[in-house]
Image (spheres, rainbow, N blue to C red):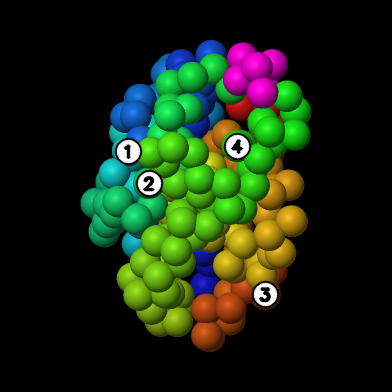
Amino acid sequence: MAYLVLVRHGITDWNKAGRWHGLTDIPLNEEGRKEAQKTGLALQDIIFEVCFTSKLKRAKQTLDEIKKVLNIPDLPTYEETALNERDYGQFTGKNKWEVQKQVGEEEFQKIRRSWNYQPAGGESLKQVYERVVPYFKNAILPHLIKGENVLITASGNSLRALVKYLENLTEDKVSKLEFGIAEAYVYGTDQYGKVISKQIRARNLQRGKI
């Protein structure tokens, strides 16, 4: 059995302020670095062979902190734009809770969580899925099939898209999925890379609020 571990990046100042990051390259704050370190401690029983991360600082810094804790600084690591966060277009940088007040709960949930909603100049979750999943199949899955343990650090929406594929979630279920800050989804996979078990480690009590 090989492990596939998905980790959402630690907290940033924009997370704290309730602002949509999108592709804006905001780094972790000090709390975020400490969260990533705690996540690393929760993964000490797994020996990783390879890592993947998005091109965004917050994901790369999260991986750096985990690698320090696990003492694996030289582990092969691949950075990929396909794993980047969803592009929120016109909503990038805006305070999500202010937008919620302006547009109402139904429209807000459509903007934030629906499968097909595409903001002006941005992406829908479906479009994120269409870039994440092919990359997973082509670049990451072969490592799992070889029996290698894989660590991925990325953002909430790119990971939600991948979880939809891995767990065969419906559009409705993925719209309700909350992947908490600095949480780790630990999947056990079979010889074909199919999921056979799941744990959530470093569970974040603020999941859904940021």
How far apart are the two marked residues, 1 and 4, measured between alpha carbons?
22 Å
In which quadrant of the rendered image does the N terminus lie? bottom right
The residue positioned 65% from the left and 17% from the top of the image is 102
Disc 2 marks a residue whose amino acid type is Asn
Whether pointer 1 and pointer 4 mark residues with C-beta atoms closer than 8 Å, the reply is no
**Per the image, is 189 magenta?**
no
Q: Identify the mark at residue 196; answer none if there is no mark.
A: 3
Of callouts 1 and 3, the N-terminal one: 1
Disc 3 crowd, CA 10 A, few/some/many (<14, 14-19, 20+): few
Does the rendering let one see residue 172?
yes
Does the rendering let one see residue 1?
no
- Nearest the viewer among 9 and 85 is 85
Q: From the viewer's perspective, is residue 210 above or below residue 132? A: above
- Nearest the viewer among 121 and 26 is 121
Secondary structure under tag 4 reads helix
Task: Determine which residue is flagged by label 4.
Answer: 111
Secondary structure under tag 3 reads strand
How far apart are the two marked residues, 1 and 3, measured between alpha carbons?
30 Å
How far apart are the two marked residues, 2 and 3, measured between alpha carbons?
26 Å
The residue positioned 34% from the left and 29% from the top of the image is 24
Q: From the viewer's perspective, is residue 7 above or below residue 130? A: above
Q: Is residue 66 left or right of residue 113?
A: left
The residue positioned 38% from the left and 38% from the top of the image is 121
Task: Determine which residue is flagged by label 1.
Answer: 56
The residue positioned 59% from the left and 68% from the top of the image is 166
How far apart are the two marked residues, 1 and 2, measured between alpha carbons?
7 Å
- Residues rendered magenta in the picture: 98-103
Measured as percent of width and height from the top left, residue 46 is found at 51, 58
Question: Hey, which residue is sitting farthest bottom in the picture?
Answer: 191
Task: Determine which residue is flagged by label 2.
Answer: 84
Secondary structure under tag 2 reads loop
- Nearest the viewer among 203 and 54 is 54
